[in-house]
Amino acid sequence: MTKSQANTSSSAPPKVDGLDFGFNVPLDRAELSSAKWEYEISRKGDPTLLCFGTAEMDYRAAPPICAALERVAKAGHFGYPYKRVSYYEAIIGYFNRHFSWSIQKDWIASNVGIYPSMQPIIDELTSPGDEIIYQPPVHHIFPEVITAAGRTAVANPLVKRGTRYEMDFEDLAAKTTARTKILLLCSPHNPVGRVWTREELERLNAFCLERGVIVVADEVYCSLVFEGVEFTPFAGLSQSASLNSITLVSASKSFNVTGLKHSLFVAENPDLRDAYMRGLKRNNLYFGGCIFGQAATEAAFRDCDDWSLAAVRYIQGNFEYLRSFIEKHLPLVTVTTPEATYFAWLDFGRLGLSVDELRSFFEDEAHVVVTLGEPLGAGGKGHARFNLGTTRSLVEEGLHRIAQAYERRTAS
Ligand SMILES: Cc1ncc(COP(=O)(O)O)c(C=O)c1O
């Protein structure tokens, strides 16, 4: 059984009222050098730029993570790490506590990231020319990782109904052939913020089982699910789903440790695990790992529930601010309602700008960086992804700048 029988009692939610993790406090950037901020400022040569692009948060990591990293640094020895029992207990405990998903130690392997894990999976489980399905608009690496491996990337675009996206099962059936071997699922979905319901995932599972398609579920945003929304790990649906899938997950996005390079691979099916290990060996990636990333992952999954809930609440507050601001000041722009992640997915299509014009609108006129939707594939045109994982005051300032640029554009 993959779903916990014994311990479905999620422990009581942590008490976060009154706890202050400093989400409102801007980081002191003097010693920082990040792709999200310092790279963009240097790329544009614009020190006034505000950056809402790269997928990470502008928050200090949770105190238990910082303490775990300090302990490693203080010990002063940075050799190849070994995973103690406590590491596995932290991971197993987290998924059981939050999602009633029971996993076993033997199902877990690690790597330096989610995307580096996709490549050995694709190499070992498919042959050149085989087809792999992905669901755009989605992070551009999904199709890139497929085509870089010499496989055919087949888009099964999401469909937008009102302000919510859904999977297109008719299109999926039409696109699936005898050469379709894997479906790369993004759950929760970046950038559209969907948390797939159990019913949607069950339908997907039934389809993939019938057509012999393995599901590789990228669940990296599973700990950034908004309050009141239920996340179901794909493999936690049923034993058939568990045996026909691989889960890729990490603490990196949800606990803001993207630079620590540690991710998890989870599969109940020993054939899928063996294939993955073969792929890692071929790339000489099966030994070693990042000692800091390992320590941070253990602390994140064991000791940071309160920080995580507080971060989600803060980000939900940022989203509510953004939604009402846009309704009031940018009426031509449509806001998708997210159920997870720190992204607001915004449709600027009615401004009628090309991708270059839209980039210039944000970067040269508003002096803000966002992630443009067009490179995220079908359905991304005219859209922008605004990262809400920052202080409320920066969200306010960024939106005011965008509103001023919008007024200039719409007045002319
Ligand atoms: C859906 C998704 N998966 C994975 C990643 C990257 O994960 P990693 O840095 O572990 O490869 C990203 C980064 O933005 C992402 O959006």
Image: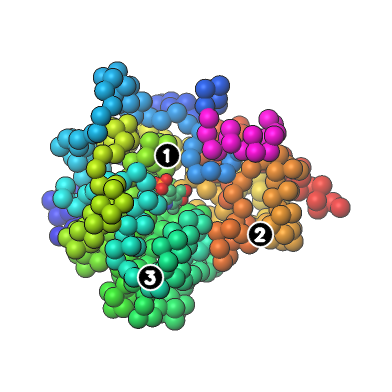
Looking at the picture, how far across and down is residue 192, in whole percent? 51, 57
Instruction: Residue at 46%, 68% (x, y): give it.
Output: 153
Res. 81 image quadrant: top left
Within 8 Å of ligand 1, the CB of disc 1? yes
Give whichever of discs 3 and 2 has the lower sequence position: 3
- Residue type at mark 2: give it: Gly
From where the camera sits, is residue 327 visible?
Answer: yes
Q: Check disc 2 and report the residue beneath it.
A: 382
State the SS at label 1: helix
Q: Give the range drawn in magenta.
A: 33-50
Work out which quarter of the rendered image holds the N terminus and state it: bottom left
Using the image, determine if residue 219 lies above or below residue 35: below
Q: Which of 184 and 303 is in front in this view?
A: 184
| The magenta stretch spans residue 47 | yes
Separation (CA) of disc 3 from disc 2:
34 Å
- For the point 61% across and 38% down, which residue is it? 40
Between the residue at mark 1 and the residue at mark 2, the CA separation in whole angstroms equals 28 Å
The amino acid marked with disc number 3 is Pro
Residue 42 % position (x, y): 64, 34
- Colour mode? rainbow
The image's mark for residue 128 is 3
Which disc number belongs to residue 258?
Answer: 1
Element assignment for label 2: loop
